Image (spheres, rainbow, N blue to C red):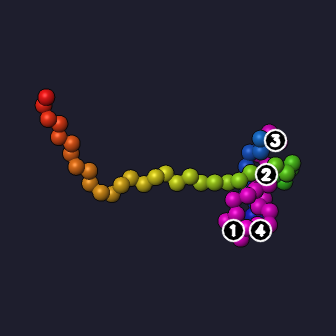
Amino acid sequence: MSERELHCDTCGSTQQFEAPPCVDGHGADCPERACTGCGTAVVMSFINAPRRSTRRRTAVHHRAA
């Protein structure tokens, strides 16, 4: 099991969090962690920002009214 120090809101301090055995097949990349102090479970997630389009945008030409 991999361990990591994180802030536990339930304990109110920094605690060791460990990954329980993963039944979903994630292995070492499992996003679930449990506080070793109180047992509070958290799911770690990383958000990927959307990539900007690589195609060129054409200029918009406005006509006079």
The residue where tag 1 is placed is 26
Image: magenta residue range: 10-34
Mark 2 / mark 3, whichever is N-terminal: 3
Q: Amino acid at mark 1?
A: His
The residue where tag 4 is placed is 23
Regarding mark 2 in the picture, which secondary structure is present there?
Answer: strand
Q: Amino acid at mark 3?
A: Thr
Residue furthest to the front: 65
Decide: few, some or many residues near mark 4? Use Cα within 10 Å; few <14, some 14-19, many ≥20: few
Residue 44 placed where, x, y %? 67, 54
Nearest to the eye among marks 4 and 2: give it.
4
Residue 53 placed where, x, y %? 36, 55
Q: Quadrant of residue 63?
A: top left
Q: CA distance from mark 2 to mark 3?
A: 10 Å
Q: Is residue 23 magenta?
A: yes
Mark number displayed over residue 10? 3
Regarding mark 4 in the picture, which secondary structure is present there?
Answer: loop
Regarding mark 3 in the picture, which secondary structure is present there?
Answer: loop
Mark 3 / mark 4, whichever is N-terminal: 3
The residue where tag 2 is placed is 41
The residue lying at 71 percent from left, 71 percent from top is 25
Mark 1 / mark 2, whichever is N-terminal: 1
